[in-house]
Image (cartoon, rainbow, N blue to C red):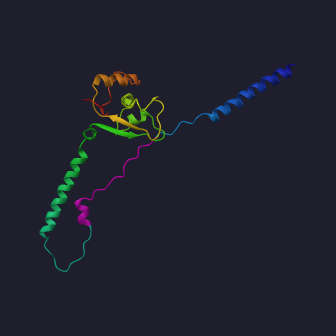
Amino acid sequence: MLYSCTHRVSMNILAVIVLLCILSACAKQPSKTALVEKPPEVKQETLEEKKAVPEKPSVVAEKPAPEAAVIAEADKKEAAETKVEAKEPVKKKLIGKDQHTVKKGESLWWIAKYKDRYNDPYLWPLIYETNKKKIKNPDLIYPGQKFDIPRKGYSMEVIKQKRKKAGAPKPYLPPKEAFTPLD
């Protein structure tokens, strides 16, 4: 009698272990988050590099032609303009509305967290409310969906409320590096 009770208990424990193994194997694995690929860096040739290119040897030393001086001046101006463009903050380029096409594994949280979007994941409710017609459940978005990303039209009070709703820590202010869609 004691043997059958012990045998029954051990069989039940074994059955529970087998069920747990099966359930853990069937459980949905967390999807990998989408990585934002950086665009390949385009290397600007500097004036020194252009001058470093070996020219064909000439027997007679020539004076630089006037066209060469004009081209050199144009190169200097172009180099100065590219430096000025690189120093412009990203916020100036993000005026109006942007669009984002959802990639596999993304969520509204991740989209809002991207540096070229808001750089603040707690601003995901702004994307949700702007695209309510396209999103039935904010936890379920699908690859290929195109969402509008608002860039202006909100006050700081509204942004604080949205960050609070998303679970941001007090005082609910966005970080300094965030691109908030303020008026």
Task: Say above or below: 58 vs 180.
Answer: below
For residue 79, what is the image quadrant?
bottom left
Q: Give the x, y percent position of residue 60.
A: 16, 79
Q: Say whether residue 43 is left or right of residue 67.
A: right
Q: Give the x, y percent position of residue 94.
A: 28, 39
Residue in the picture at 41% in, 30% down: 133
Q: Main secondary structure of the magenta part?
A: loop
Residue in the picture at 24% in, 64% down: 50
Q: Say whether residue 87 is left or right of residue 148.
A: left
Using the image as rendered, state which of residue 103 and residue 133 is in the foreground: 133
Extreme residue toward the front, this view: 133
Residue in the picture at 64% in, 36% down: 25
For residue 22, what is the image quadrant?
top right
Q: Is residue 118 visible?
A: no
Residue in the picture at 23% in, 61% down: 48
Using the image as rendered, state which of residue 69 and residue 146 is in the foreground: 146
State yes or no: residue 41 in magenta. Answer: yes
Extreme residue toward the top, this view: 1
Q: Is residue 38 visible?
A: yes
State yes or no: residue 66 in magenta. Answer: no
> In which quadrant will I find the N terminus?
top right
> In which quadrant will I find the C terminus?
top left
Task: Say above or below: 31 vs 50.
Answer: above
Q: Give the x, y percent position of residue 122.
A: 38, 28
For residue 108, what is the image quadrant?
top left
Q: Give the x, y percent position of residue 100.
A: 38, 39
Q: Which residues are magenta?
A: 34-52
